[in-house]
Image (cartoon, rainbow, N blue to C red):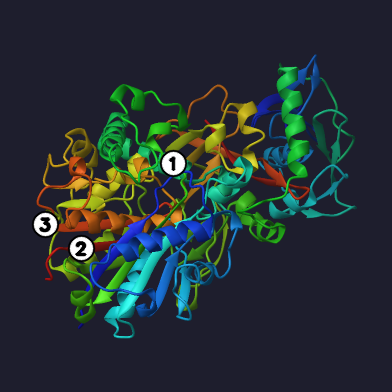
């Protein structure tokens, strides 16, 4: 079967972007095109998948058609992919499958969200649209609340504590400090992160990612094309996905995310590797407890040991076997919902090619993982990348 | 039925009499009973009916215009003008449920801050006229699940009890089950700041200094999430017991939405 590589990747800066949907997408696409080493024209693209929640309803229908016409991708099959915050993780997987199936040679996967041009009231209505509306929302829960319930239960079952979450927050802010694309480039001390105002007890402001504007774009190619387009393609070694009950009350446990376990098991199996082989991982830390649980569900830490993993700083840049969120993660880099998944791919593409700022470059990075979660874990996409074809 | 016994019941004051029960809000302003932050005549009536259910069987009731009939129907009571039992609303925060004369009487409550009460009342009025700008539970969706939401009506598949109800296919389609028992154990909890609460609660959350939610394992097995009522004096604790009472959840599109809230034991 054909192998698939990423040959180009680009994104906007995350944060409060001055441009609208069309402008942000064009900026990300242009950056992705420019990153391709060989001769490339957008007209070579066979298909495009773009992840977006269409936050605020600005272009809820036919989002992909609107965007692709503003990036030279005319008259090709396009579609919006929606799986909450995992939208573009799944868009990437759809693009990978389109090439794997032999139906396409060059495919665009991307994502976009414009979140910060809404009124506060309208924003709050939209922030919960991906959770269980009928039961959880009516019990006062949006995602800060659901992740707070998970955190307190994890503390109870495994002896983890809020200081463990603070370590994650401090690490991710430290990693994002020099990332030119990051939303929150702040050096945050342990004391400051520990004393943030309470959002959803026990989660404080410093446990929560920001809402960001942003777009990201990735170009995938079949092996016979990739070698012509790129001197240094990054190979997709595995792509897994999973799902779980939308509402927490239907799950057998609220201290693990089964969709992550399922997705990573598939991706590891396809890649023929284990968690121990990963050099860096872009992990979905929408809340610090999400990263703590992900380190367990992805196999970097034993079940229940995510707190110890964080406490001991094992995920810090170049300090342990694996660097977790060298971009700063969602906590520092930002979280433009639909753009986050392919934004993670942009980061690992550059990390594996040695193209990020030297101060945050993972040494000898050979294999990387992206982990993109929808909502409180109802959906998850995990992709594994390598410098070398397996 | 005992006589002239007044007790604290589901956060209210209930006085059992020979022919029925009088339920008053426990909150007062200068001695006059006023509704609490999430109560009204309907929630007082349901509270009274649940107290009477320990004493006798009531299947149908006659109600006046201040009671929301859909809540009674969801809880298994039919509405009948000729029913033996009548629910009458007092001018203050009081209801009488009786098969004879209207139950009246004095019972001491607890003074509530007048400004707080005024702000909450205004917030409810404003909320009633609010329209969703995003996530939304339609009136139809709310009413179709109201029996499960207010009466814990479950589904059954073999020995397995399912709640909240699920839509399944083929051999996995569950049968209608009975109402689950209304108590459980706290497995987790959180208190949300005004900024962390959904928009439906954004007017009241700042006045209440946040809203609290518990993740509960019901004693019959299924789990659920519930807002906490009357948590001024008690912090929830994992492993702690809860039972439930029907209260106002939020208002939208001109309609109050009701549901079970957890009471910390």
Residue B150 falls left or right of residue A107: right
**Is the residue B140 above or below the residue A210 in the image?**
below
Residue A361 in picture, x, y percent from top left: 18, 46
Nearest the viewer among A307 and A348 is A348
Q: Residues within 10 Å of mark 1 (few under 14, many from 20)?
A: many
Please say whether residue A251 is visible from this viewpoint: no
Q: Kindly state the secondary structure of the residue where label 3 is placed.
A: helix
The quarter holding residue B230 reads top right
Q: Is residue A6 visible?
A: yes
In the orientation shown, which residue stands out farthest toward the top? B30
Q: Residue furthest bottom?
A: A103
Q: Are marks 3 and 2 in contact (CB under 8 Å)?
A: no
Which is nearer the N-term, disc 3 or disc 2? Answer: 3
Question: Pointer 2: what residue?
Answer: A385
Task: Tell me which numbered mark, 1 or 3, is placed earlier along the sequence.
Answer: 1
Indicate left or right for A295 with B211 as reference.
Answer: left
Q: CA distance from mark 2 to mark 1?
A: 27 Å
Q: Is residue A87 left or right of residue A35?
A: right
Say which mark, if any, is on residue A277.
3
Q: CA distance from mark 1 to mark 3?
A: 31 Å
Q: Are marks 1 and 3 on the same chain?
A: yes
Q: Residue at x 37, y 48 (%)?
A: A254
Q: CA distance from mark 3 to mark 2?
A: 11 Å
Height in image: B87 above or below B134? above
- List x then y, in percent, for residue A330: 36, 46
Does residue A376 appear to the left or right of A275 in the view shown? right
Residue A135: where, in percent of width, then height? 56, 52
Q: Are marks 3 and 2 on the same chain?
A: yes
Q: Is residue A246 above or below residue A318?
A: below
Residue drawn at point x = 47 percent, y = 64 percent:
A82
Residue A353 appears in which quarter of the rendering? bottom left
**Label ID, residue A210:** 1
């Amino acid at each position: 079967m054909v192998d698939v590589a990423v040959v180009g990747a680009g994104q906007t800066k995350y944060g409060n972007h001055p441009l609208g949907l069309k402008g942000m997408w064009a900026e990300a696409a242009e950056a992705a095109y420019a990153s391709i080493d060989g001769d490339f024209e957008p007209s070579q693209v066979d298909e495009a998948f773009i992840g977006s929640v269409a936050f605020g309803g600005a272009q809820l229908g036919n989002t992909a058609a609107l965007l692709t016409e503003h990036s030279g991708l005319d008259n090709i099959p396009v579609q919006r992919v929606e799986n909450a915050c995992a939208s573009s993780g799944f868009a990437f997987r759809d693009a990978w499958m389109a090439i794997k199936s032999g139906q396409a040679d060059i495919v665009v996967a991307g994502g976009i969200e414009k979140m910060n041009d809404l009124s506060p009231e309208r924003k709050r209505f939209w922030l919960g649209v991906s959770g269980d509306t009928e039961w959880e929302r009516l019990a006062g829960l949006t995602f800060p609340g659901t992740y707070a319930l998970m955190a307190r239960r994890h503390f109870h079952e495994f002896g983890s504590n809020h200081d463990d979450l603070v370590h994650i927050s401090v690490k991710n802010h430290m990693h994002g400090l020099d990332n030119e694309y990051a939303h929150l480039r702040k050096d945050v001390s342990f004391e400051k992160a520990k004393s943030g105002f309470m959002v959803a007890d026990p989660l404080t402001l410093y446990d929560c990612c920001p809402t960001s504007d942003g777009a990201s774009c990735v170009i995938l190619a079949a092996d016979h094309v990739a070698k012509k387009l790129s001197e240094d393609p990054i190979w997709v070694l595995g792509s897994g996905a999973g799902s779980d009950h939308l509402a927490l009350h239907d799950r057998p446990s609220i201290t693990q995310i089964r969709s992550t376990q399922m997705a990573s098991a598939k991706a590891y199996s396809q890649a023929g590797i284990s968690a121990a082989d990963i050099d860096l991982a872009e992990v979905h830390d929408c809340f610090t407890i999400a990263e703590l649980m992900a380190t367990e569900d992805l196999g970097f830490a034993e079940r229940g040991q995510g707190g110890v993993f964080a406490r001991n700083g094992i995920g810090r840049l170049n300090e342990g076997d694996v660097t977790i969120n060298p971009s700063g993660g969602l906590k520092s880099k930002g979280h433009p919902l639909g753009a986050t998944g392919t934004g993670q791919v942009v980061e690992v593409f550059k990390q594996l090619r040695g193209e990020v700022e030297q101060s945050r470059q993972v040494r000898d990075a050979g294999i990387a993982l992206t982990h993109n979660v929808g909502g409180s874990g109802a959906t998850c996409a995990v992709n594994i990348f390598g410098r070398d074809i397996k | 039925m005992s006589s002239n016994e007044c007790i604290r019941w589901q956060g209210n004051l209930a006085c059992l009499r020979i022919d029925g029960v009088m339920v008053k809000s426990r909150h007062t302003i200068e001695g006059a009973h006023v509704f609490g932050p999430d109560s009204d005549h309907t929630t007082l009536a349901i509270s009274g009916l649940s107290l009477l259910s320990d004493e006798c069987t009531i299947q149908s009731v006659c109600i006046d215009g201040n009671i929301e009939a859909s809540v009674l129907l969801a809880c298994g009571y039919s509405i009948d003008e000729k029913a033996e039992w009548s629910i009458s609303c007092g001018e203050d925060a009081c209801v009488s449920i009786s098969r004879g004369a209207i139950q009246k009487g004095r019972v001491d409550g607890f003074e509530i801050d007048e400004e707080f009460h005024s702000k909450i009342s205004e917030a409810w009025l404003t909320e009633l006229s609010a329209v969703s700008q995003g996530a939304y539970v339609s009136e139809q969706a709310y009413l179709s699940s109201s029996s499960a939401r207010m009466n814990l009506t479950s589904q059954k598949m073999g020995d397995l009890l399912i709640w909240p109800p699920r839509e399944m296919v083929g051999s996995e389609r569950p049968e209608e089950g009975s109402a689950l028992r209304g108590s459980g154990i706290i497995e987790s909890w959180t208190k949300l700041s005004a900024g962390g609460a959904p928009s439906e609660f954004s007017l009241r959350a700042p006045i209440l200094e946040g809203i609290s939610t518990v993740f509960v394992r019901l004693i019959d097995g299924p789990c659920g999430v519930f807002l906490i009522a009357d948590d001024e004096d008690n912090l929830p604790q994992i492993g702690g017991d809860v039972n439930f009472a029907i209260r106002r959840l939020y208002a939208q599109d001109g309609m109050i939405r009701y549901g079970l809230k957890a009471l910390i034991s």
